[in-house]
Amino acid sequence: MKMHASYMGLNLNSPIVVSACTLSVQTDNIVKMEDNGAGAVVLFSLFEEQIRKEEARFKGVMSETSYAFAEAMDYFPDLDDFNVGTDDYLENIRKAKERVNIPIIGSLNGITNEGWVDYSKLMEQAGADGIEVNIFFIPADIAMSSQEVEHRYLNIIETIKQTVKIPVAVKLNPYFSAMGNMSLRMKNAGADALVLFNRFYQPDFDINELVIKTDLHYSESSEIRLPLLWIALLYGKVNLSLAATTGVQSAVEVIKYLLAGADVVMTASSLYKNGIPYLKIMNKELQDWMYMMGFDTINSFKGSMSQQHISDPTAYERSNYIKILEGVK
């Protein structure tokens, strides 16, 4: 039984990948992920805003201490407490590469062209096998057109690809008006993979305190429907690696995504809920299903339920929705 997978040119021992999350902050956890069968690990995201904020705080402390008497230095914060720029993140990449053999993919969430370029280059130099560009952008400015939003995405991809040689995946949202066409344009801009989809921050209201609640919730298995649809539609039509990353709670969701055409399936919520060793359980359940169904390799069934390969392609289209409504009594 061969569990090997290929993701944007990287060879993996399993199609199950750990998505960007705080579990990868500790190198020991990354080792556990490999030991339990992770095909690759996407490191926790590096946010440019956090870097800029820490740099500003550091400069502020330096400015204050520069005017202090030497004997008064004890009153100021220890400068070692300030995380200056990307040092810790890059060290995390280097340590992970020293201790594991699976691909380590950096995750970057930038806000400026300078940030995207500089931090991508640093990740590559630190030894990252690839970069996941998490373009978490909500166009709250109602004067911004859809063309401007799309251009922003494409410009980021082009800028990064001109800077690094390692593969670049784009983690994007599902809200483009023409997702298929946008996928082709991202490919033409240089993207090596698409990660479907990131989860936008969606605030809630506390009606008693009259404040905005900023809590986040783990994804649920019911959330796989939209990315499942788009992976099934894009498979075989765009020359890009496809990664699924929403609602993966068990091997059932992994199998569904692979049937739709995903090259890899990413999960974090299931590991927060069940622990890192749950990776081994998901891999075992995937292997058991493959054995039961008579599949020797991932490629022998990958994409077999995509629109390109099913007997009735209209199952993914509007006409099938009408059939469903007509069948409701």
Image: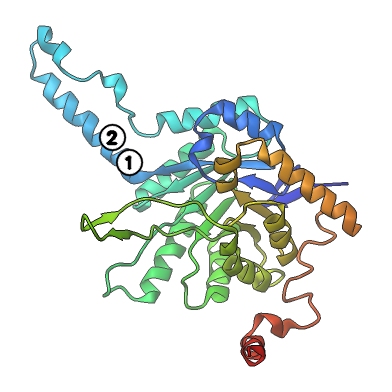
Residue 4 in sight in this render:
no
What colouring style does the render use? rainbow
- Residue beneath the point at 41% across and 29% down: 87
Residue 4: % across, % down:
79, 47
Q: Position of residue 154 (x, y in %)?
A: 46, 64
Residue sitting nearer the eye, 215 or 266: 215
**Where is 31 relative to 283, above or below?**
above
Q: Residues within 10 Å of mark 2 (few under 14, many from 20)?
A: some
- For label 1, the residue is 50
Query: In which image quadrant can residue 58 be found?
Result: top left
Residue 89, placed above or below residue 2? above
> Of residues 258 and 56, which is closer to you in this image?
258
Q: Position of residue 22 (x, y in %)?
A: 48, 38
Q: Nearer the viewer, residue 157 or 85?
A: 85
Q: Residues within 10 Å of mark 1 (few under 14, many from 20)?
A: some
Report whether residue 108 is seen.
Answer: yes
Tell me, yes or no, whether the two marked residues, 2 and 1, touch with CB atoms within 8 Å.
yes
Name the spot of residue 203 as percent of width and height, x first: 34, 59
Q: How many marks?
A: 2
Residue lying at 8% horizontally and 19% vertically, measured from the top left:
67
Q: Is residue 281 left or right of residue 109?
A: right
- Left or right: residue 311 compared with residue 50: right
Q: Quadrant of residue 260?
A: bottom right
Q: Quadrant of the C terminus?
A: bottom right
Residue for badge 2: 54
Which dot marks residue 236?
A: none
Query: Vertical placement of 207 versus 60: above or below?
Result: below
Horizontal placement of 251 versus 271: left or right?
right
Q: Residue furthest bottom?
A: 326
Badge 2 amino acid: Glu
Looking at the rendered structure, the kind of residue marked 1 is Gln
Residue at image position (45%, 55%) is: 159
